[in-house]
Image: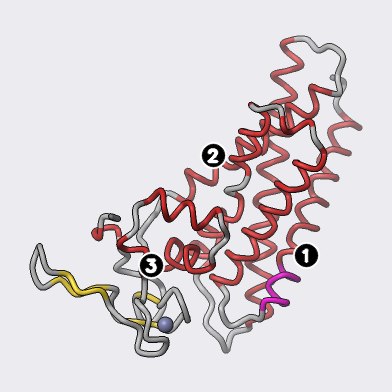
């Protein structure tokens, strides 16, 4: 069972929490009468348990995130006080850089140790630039579309939680370990997985937008990410002598 002390006390909306089924704001996720007696809150709109994940083990929550359940994303992003988004963001960037580095090495016949190290730094800078470009584009695009009349999460809240959309990068590392990355079909599958995760995150953070609009925002943000990566690679290939 999830430690209930991890449940958020300060989600940036009028109500502290949301129902993970229908997104209706709720005042609390449970009522604690004593250490042994806890009553889980029922949503007044959909009549279901507002957030069933507060009773779930972390592994089961991760399992539902992997299966792309919207409710699991809503629980993680809106109903918990998980704060290590910067750390997991760096982990996802490292995983992406490792993937880029490995793919580049497979196309090189031989390389000196110094070159290998430099190539990894290049991949790391490129992955960081691409990730930040994606996050900034999705935030400012969402802000522009939602406008000042509707509610929008603060910059830090939105950008921090948006890194969850990149968690598929971890599976890319596993695919390298298991030599699955050599298959184009598997790489495409991983890209599709990350794309769907990013849409889920966008929908969770911008519930006032339609799914179509969220898909468009994600696609434009990906295009911006790819664009900055292309510019970086062009700059490196033009000015680097390695
Ligand atoms: Zn509900």
> Magenta stretch containing residue 215, yes or no?
yes
Quote the CA–CA distance across marks 2 and 1. Answer: 24 Å
Q: Which residue is mark 1?
A: 220
Quote the CA–CA distance across marks 3 and 2. Answer: 23 Å
x and y percent of residue 116 in the render? 73, 17
Q: How is the image coloured?
A: secondary structure
Residue at 61% x, 50% y is: 166
Magenta stretch mostly in which secondary structure?
helix
Residue 91 is labelled as: 2
x and y percent of residue 89 in the render? 54, 46
Quadrant location of residue 99? Answer: top right
Residues tagged 3 and 1 counted as in contact (Cβ below 8 A): no
x and y percent of residue 91 in the render? 54, 39
Residue at 58% x, 83% y is: 208
Quadrant containing ligand 1: bottom left
Span shown in magenta = 211-217
Residue at 66% x, 31% y is: 98
Eyeballing the image, is 205 above or below 80?
A: below
Query: Which image quarter is the C terminus in?
Result: top right
Query: Which image quarter is the N terminus in?
Result: bottom left
């Amino acid at each position: 069972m999830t430690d209930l002390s991890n449940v958020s006390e300060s989600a940036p909306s009028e109500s502290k929490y949301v129902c993970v089924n229908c997104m209706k704001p709720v005042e609390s996720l449970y009522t604690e009468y004593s250490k042994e007696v806890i009553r889980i809150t029922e949503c007044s709109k959909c009549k279901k348990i507002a957030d069933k994940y507060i009773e779930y083990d972390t592994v089961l929550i991760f399992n539902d995130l992997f299966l792309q359940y919207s409710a699991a994303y809503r629980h993680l992003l809106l109903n918990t006080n998980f704060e290590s988004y910067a750390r997991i963001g760096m982990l996802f960037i490292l995983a992406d850089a490792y993937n880029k580095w490995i793919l580049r090495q497979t196309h090189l016949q031989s390389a000196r140790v110094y070159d290998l190290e430099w190539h990894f730094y290049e991949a790391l800078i490129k992955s960081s630039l691409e990730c930040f470009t994606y996050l900034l584009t999705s935030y400012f695009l969402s802000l522009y579309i939602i406008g000042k009349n509707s509610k929008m999460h603060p910059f830090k809240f939105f950008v921090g939680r948006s890194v969850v959309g990149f968690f598929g990068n971890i599976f890319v590392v596993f695919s390298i370990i298991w030599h699955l990355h050599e298959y184009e079909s598997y790489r495409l599958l991983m890209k599709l997985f990350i794309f769907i995760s990013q849409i889920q995150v966008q929908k969770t953070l911008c519930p006032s937008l339609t799914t179509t609009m969220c898909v468009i925002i994600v696609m434009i943000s990906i295009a911006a990410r790819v664009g900055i990566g292309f510019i970086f690679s062009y700059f490196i290939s033009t000015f680097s002598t390695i």
